[in-house]
Image: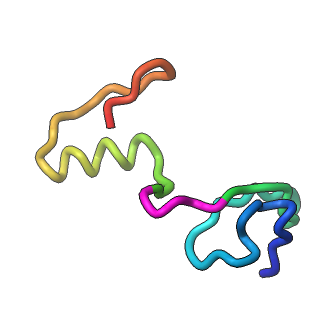
Amino acid sequence: MKILNNLVPGSADHTGPVLVYLVDGHIQGGFVLRPDEFVTSLTALDETRKLAGLPASSFSRTQTDL
């Protein structure tokens, strides 16, 4: 898939993950993920914390316990 650099800045010479937003299969925008970033849901993150033996955490718009 060819991603135009003006839609996802930094993608032209990037090797690695990017996050894109699609509308009807067409890229509308996005961004390159930094080396320390990943994409998941809060539910999956909480389940992973539990499986790792870490305490459950609460997430809100004002506080994130990551």
Residue 13 position (above or below residue 47): below
Of the 4 image quadrants, the one containing the C terminus is: top left
Q: Residue at x 15, y 42 (%)?
A: 54
Q: Which of 29 and 35 is in front in this view?
A: 35
64 up-or-down from 32: above or below = above
- Counting from the top left corner in percent of width and height, residue 10 is at 72, 65
Residue 57 occupies which quadrant of the picture? top left
- Image spot of residue 25 (x, y percent): 84, 66
Image coordinates for residue 39, horizontal then vertical, percent: 50, 55
The residue located at (81%, 73%) in the rendering is 3
User: In screen coordinates, is 7 left or right of 43?
Assistant: right
Please tell me which residue lies in front, 3 or 34.
Answer: 34
Q: Is residue 33 above or below residue 42?
A: below
Residues shaded magenta: 32-36
Report whether 53 appears left or right of 3: left
Q: Is residue 9 found left or right of 25 in the rendered image? A: left
User: Could you tell me which residue is drawn at 11 percent across and 46 percent down?
Assistant: 53
Q: Is residue 17 magenta?
A: no
